[in-house]
Image (cartoon, helix red, strand yellow):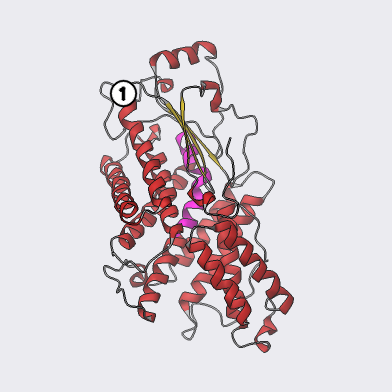
Amino acid sequence: MEGLEGLVLQGIYHLNAGSPRRAWLIFRRALSIGQLMGLQKRSASAISPNARNMWHLIVRGDRYVALLLGLPAGSCEDKYEADENFQNPAIDKDDLFQRKLSEISLRIIERNQSENTPVYAATQEIDELLETLGKEMPDSWWEIPTHISDERSQGTSKQFDRLMVQIWYFQLQGLVHLPFMLRAATERRYDYSRFSCLKACREVIWRYLAIRGLNNHSFCYKMVDFGALTATVALFLGLLDPSQSAENSHQRDSDRTMINGVLHTMEGFANNTNETIAAQSVNVIKSLLAIDQQSAGGNGENLRLTIPYFGTISIVRPASNQSSRTEDANPNMPVFPSPQSITVGQNNPSEPWKGINPSNHNPMTFPTVSFTSCQFNPMVPEQPVIADFGWADADTLYFGSLLNTDIDGNWMFQ
């Protein structure tokens, strides 16, 4: 058991250090050894009183990293005893909550790994599981602490663990709806996915800002910075939805303020620590925010942004001659929105476009955005690719920090 505990600690270390692939290899090794020892069986307590808890930790780590990397899980569904429920006053609710989150992670992995098109009904079922699970914890449990001590104590560790679990919960909620979020631009039945995904991203960012605002120098978890980046990118993509022109402007302004807050926080953190992931996150966010300013002028170069374990964002900024050439070349080009390559227009940038009314303006003059996820199978294989617009003038930005610190460190993008 001591050897397995060492592997779990090693996996957590590499995950905190921003090396998810290395962490996955270690967790998968621990999983295989645990299975050979029979820890997955209900009789595992005969091996050691701590055997079942150790097995749950291994499974939790494996599923967390597998979902991030887009890989299948290494274990099947969990088995619960009759008294393992939230109604049992003697149960450790925090531990049970994490086990349930791990089980939901498995459901998301199975949906993503399916060869068939991800069914929206399955997404709704997973969302319902998350909503039900969230209600099992009291409101006080969800509160964000305003102060966490620097001292190494169980109380401090418990506060950090609770924040990490909350972030994990909202990350799952965002990942569940991300494939369908941008489809709300053309199919109103996906409005709930858009609302839920953006709401979850805000929750992640609030907790990230709270953590980085604590000035706790003993805290080191690079995947939190990465999670904050992906939440910020998803929130930014939500602002590009032209169908939301009548949406409450206060919420949109609040989202932009939140994005700038993440930028300011990461910028200060990167300057003080020389942290590579935070520094590259700053470049990514600045590149996205620059789209508003350049698009407001009616020109600017294109942008293709690749974020490992998240996807590729391609943006064609509006140009009068470019849009007219595109329309003349193929005025009836069909558009098939999908969670893999979704083409939408942009509206309401941080500096509003003067004189443009989205209701009567040609959508081809707006920036065209395509998001290609690295975790989901295409829903429409015949989707026209955004490369038709021409990428000779494109800025290509690769977010490679996680890859450069992981295993080979020389993965190539095309």
Which quadrant: the N terminus?
bottom right
| Residue 274, image x, y percentages | 37, 53
| Residue 406, image x, y percentages | 56, 54
Amino acid on which disc 1 is placed: Asn
Q: Residue at x 35, y 57 (%)?
A: 273
Q: Is residue 93 left or right of residue 209?
A: right
Q: Residue at x 43, y 51 (%)?
A: 277
Q: Is residue 182 magenta?
A: yes
**What crowding class fits label 1: few (fewer than 14 Cα within 10 Å), some (14-19), or many (20 or more)?**
few
Residue 141 visible in the picture: yes
Dominant SS type (magenta): helix
Q: Where is residue 372, by image quadrant?
A: top right
**Mark 1: secondary structure:** loop
Q: Residue at x 36, y 79 (%)?
A: 155
Give the magenta range.
170-189
| Residue 289, image x, y percentages | 34, 37
Q: Is residue 403 left or right of residue 4?
A: left
Which quadrant: the C terminus?
top right
Q: Is residue 64 magenta?
A: no
Q: Where is residue 5, by image quadrant?
A: bottom right
| Residue 337, image x, y percentages | 54, 33
- Give above or below for 11 relative to 391: below
Q: Residue at x 53, y 27 (%)?
A: 386
Residue under label 1: 357
Residue 105 visible in the picture: no
